[in-house]
Amino acid sequence: MERIDSHVSPRYAQIPTFMRLPHEPDPRGYDVVVIGAPYDGGTSYRPGARFGPRAIRNESGLIHGVGIDRGPGTFDLINCVDAGDMDLTPFDMNIAIETAQQHLAAVLKHNAAFLMLGGDHSLTVAALRAVAEQHGPVAVVHLDAHSDTNPAFYGGRYHHGTPFRHGIDEKLVDPSAMVQIGIRGHNPKPDSLDYARGHGVRVVTADEFGERGVRGTVDLIRERVDRRPVYVSVDVDVVDPAFAPGTGTPAPGGLSSREVLALLRCIGDLKPVGFDVMEVSPPYDHAGITSLLATEIGAELLHQYARAHRTPM
C-alpha cells in the first residue's frame, strides 16, 4: 500500500486518512500507526472533541510528507498507516477507557508505536497503560495548559483532568523524567499543582516558558528525559486560543504555534515510543485553524520519530 499521490489526485479528493496514508484496519509490522480516538465523555466544559479525529484528518490532506530543508521525507524513512478509529462508547467512561487500552495494546503487540488523535485527554491513561506494558514506566513530555493530575470529581474517575495522576499512581510514568510545559490559567483550589510537584514532576508554567524560551526548555527536556523511552502528549490547548480556539477548555496566555512546533523538534533526539494529540473540538474551531495545527503537530511528531529511529539511506 502507498500514500495517495497528490500529483495524481488533488489533496481535497478521496477518503480522508491522516496525511493520505493507506488505511489499514488491522496493522502489523509498521513503525507508527495513526489511530483516532473519537470520544469526549471525560470533558468538563465544552464538548465536541469526539469530532476531533475526523476534523484533523480532513485538514491533514494539506500536509505533504517532506518538510522544508529536512532531506528525505518522513514516509521515505518510516512505514506508517492510518488504522481508522477506535469504537468507544459515549455512555460509560470506564468502558471507554478499557476499550481504548485493549485496542492500543493490540496495536503495540504488532507495531512499534502509535499516534493517537483525540478526543479528550482522559484517553491518555489508556495509552500510558498500553505503552508501559511494552516499555515499563516511561518518561513523559506533556504540553498542556493544565497539569491533568487532578483527583476524580462529579463521580467520574476518568475525566480529562486525571490521566497523569493515574499514570503516576499506577507507576506507568516515571515522574522524575516527566516535564509538563505551558501550564497556566485558573483552578478551583490554590494547591492544584501540589500533586505533580510533590511527586517530582518538573512543571514549566507558561510564564516560566516565556522566560526560558524554546532553547532553555529544550535543554530541560533533554536533561530530564535523557535516553529513557518517552511518551509525548500534546493537548492542543497548550497553544494560545488566538491560534487554537477549537478546544474544550481554552486558556489565554499560551504558547504560539511556532513555539510548540519548535519545542517538538527535540523529540527526535530522544527515544519516543508513542504520541497523542488531544482536545481538538471542531464546533469551536474557526476556519479549521485548530485542526490544521493539530495535523501539523502530528506530522512533526511522525518526522521526529523517523529522526529518532531511522538513519537516512
Image (tube, rainbow, N blue to C red):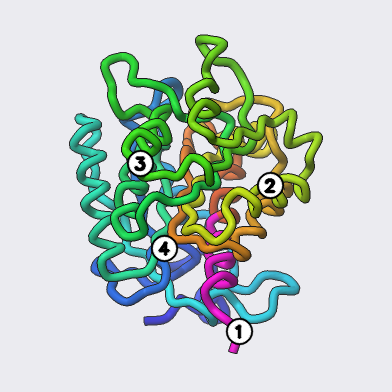
Q: Residue at x 60, y 36 (%)?
A: 202
* Residue at the top extreme of this rendering: 189
Tell me if residue 299 is in the magenta stretch. yes
Figure disc tally: 4
Q: Give the alpha-carbon distance from disc 3 to disc 1, as whole Å.
A: 36 Å
Q: Magenta part of the protein: which range?
A: 298-313
Please state which amino acid type lies under the numbered disc 1.
Pro
Q: Element at badge 4?
A: loop
For marks 2 and 4, the one nearer the N-term is: 4
Q: How many residues crowd around disc 1 within 10 Å: few (fewer than 14), some, or many (20 or more)?
A: few
Please state which amino acid type lies under the numbered disc 3.
Lys
For marks 1 and 4, the one nearer the N-term is: 4
Residue annotated with mark 4: 17
Q: How many residues crowd around disc 3 within 10 Å: few (fewer than 14), some, or many (20 or more)?
A: some
Q: Are marks 2 and 4 in contact (CB under 8 Å)?
A: no
Q: Residue 73, percent across and down? A: 60, 77
Question: Mark 2 or mark 4, which is nearer to you?
Answer: 2
Residue annotated with mark 2: 220
Residue annotated with mark 1: 312
Q: Residue 185, percent across and down? A: 62, 21
| 282 displayed left or right of 208 | left
Mainly helix, strand or loop, the magenta region? Answer: helix
